[in-house]
Image (cartoon, rainbow, N blue to C red):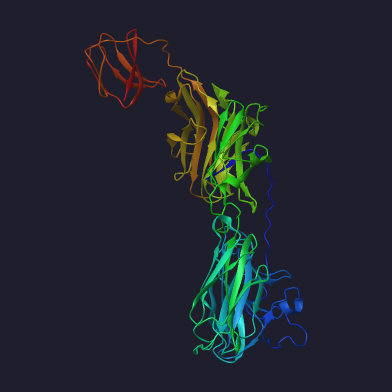
Amino acid sequence: MNKKLLLLSLTVAACTLQASAIGTSGRAGRAAAGDDDIITPPYTLNLKSETERARYTIIDANGDGNTWVGYSFAFRCYTQGELPADDWLVSPGIALTQGSTYTITFKGHNRQSDKPEVYTLLAGSKPEAAALTDTVAPTVTFTAVETEEYTTTYRAPSTGVYYFGFHCTSPAASASAYLEAWSISAPAGKASPDSVTALQVTAGARGQMSATIAFTTPVKNADGSALTQIATATVTNLTTGNTVATLTAPQAGTPLSVTDQAPVNGNNKYRVVCASAAGEGIPAEASAYVGIDTPLPVGRGNWTQQGTKAVLTWPAVSTTGVHGGYVNPDEVTYKIAMMSPEPQVIATGVKGTTYTDATLATLQGQTFLYYAVYPVSKAGTGGGSPTFSGTFGTPFATPATESFAGAQLTHSPWYVVDYAGDENSSWDIVAQSTSPAMQPQDSDGGMAVMHTADDGDHMLTSPMFALGSAVSQLKFYVNNYAFDNRLRVFISDDRGHSWTQLHEVGMTGKTWEERTVDLADYAGKTVNIGFRGEVLAYNNPIMLDNISIATTQSGITATTTAPQLRLNGRTLTAPAQQHRLTVYSTSGQTVATVAPGQPVDVTLAPGIYLVRTGAVTTKLAVR
């Protein structure tokens, strides 16, 4: 559930990058002579070479014009279309030998962390989608805008030329998938050792700068034959480039472990490879985060107003970090940023889980206020967590009226709480409505309209108003001409932490209707009023105008007790009266009347009532 300022003047430039379709199938381009030369591994993609990029085949299989494009920094697949992605990036031909095993590494990322990108890696005998049927790496999902690396192996089923296809299958309306690099190693000898198994890297406890690499030596060669002897097992930290250990003549099928005492604070990637007289075997790789990690976001915080200051609180930081590493809560500090009304960092190096903001002392009236809290460790700054957002300052006195005259606000801020829908639906203050054409109820050049391009659920929320001790009521005018629209009126006496529904408006027809809502239960309290509109179809707006909070005029100036009245549960009884008996609600409406000389027998709903008979008025509370 998001909140946003209503009358903040913002201009957002929407920019969509659209790739030019190369064709449903074919070369991205042709290089000079030698374009079709077959590659013999090892091979590493050189993205900076335009000639090499042009040797890749691009297939826009769904024909939507969104597909792979090559740049000097990455191949990029546009996935923001209305159809799920079905796009291929296919390598030049690569010569492989039957039974040989090759190590393939590729790196990528996505454009938006909230929109995962998906692709698989397949191999085949032709640079055509129908021929790429041999799975090399099953579904890979990129979930971060930072680079992620994957390593796999491929054993060639026969000697020949192979093409490797990166097949993007991201959901519709995603963003972009990137392939930053890929490589294929020289073949491991058929009689060289297979890869180790059960490879696991365990970081030192509580941020200790060490890592234990455990694995089991292989029992077979790369071609599946029995492994008779291992010459060495070498463990390398690929991140630092250091050889952690070289174990001499380990037994086949033996669990082993070594410890790296000099890893970096961060992600460390390790490679373990065994060698025999036939040469170096198939490597295996694994990673772990070592040392102190960047903290995870702490979660939603809160603030309370204490005089002219805002006192913030937030949850304690987790001991597990962004990358699964350790975070020491005692060493974490916090950065506090005010997000509204004025985006600014107001404090750094804060210890503990509370902070008092004294920067609002000169505020006049009210403002819409919220913050973001960022945890900081020596490894970096974690993501910001928003606090509660609501109104801060001095409540407006009542009676008060907001008519949006001249499409401006008399009392500010009004803001919008978004429950459902996108930027194409919200509440706005306008001079008049154009569809349908409607003038403001009071002809003052301003009213509130909830518009939508499809459907939406948004609440127009008032500033704080201080209700007097006298009985108060809310009045407003509404035009809700669509039968499937819904407008509900809510009230909050805790700045918007919780809301209570007071009233609901259905279809009104294409005309203004006045509605009155009793606020007696909130007398003496400070409240916000919320108008929550739900629109289910295009161009069916809800319109509001001339909203007022006023003291009820009941005509009764004092109450006394009428001893003859009795309240049994919810039933009011009395003997025959000399005068007419009338029961009023606190909003002044007549609930029931009993003619003179008739006994009283009236059942009442829970609430507060005023009962008048002759010159005597009695106040009753029915529960």
Number of residue marks:
0
Q: Note whether residue 479 is visible.
A: no
Q: Which residue is at the front of the view, 406 or 416?
A: 416
Q: Quadrant of residue 582?
A: top left
From what the image shows, is residue 565 above or below residue 324? above
In the displayed structure image, the side of residue 203 where residue 504 appears, left or right: left
Q: Note whether residue 456 is visible.
A: yes
Q: Which residue is at the front of the view, 318 or 583?
A: 318
Q: Quadrant of residue 461?
A: top right
**Residue occupying the far right of the picture:** 32
Residue 280 picture location, percent across and down? 61, 84
Residue 485 picture location, percent across and down? 47, 44
Q: Which residue is at the front of the view, 120 or 9?
A: 120
Residue at the image position 53 percent from the left and 50 percent from the top: 318
From what the image shows, is residue 343 above or below residue 398? below
Residue 83 picture location, percent across and down? 56, 67
Q: Which residue is at the front of the view, 356 or 538?
A: 356
Residue at the image position 63 percent from the left and 36 percent from the top: 431
From what the image shows, is residue 317 above or below residue 414? below
Residue 219 picture location, percent across and down? 49, 84
Residue at the image position 43 percent from the left and 39 percent from the top: 506
From what the image shows, is residue 622 above or below residue 175? above
The quadrant of the image that shows the C terminus is top left
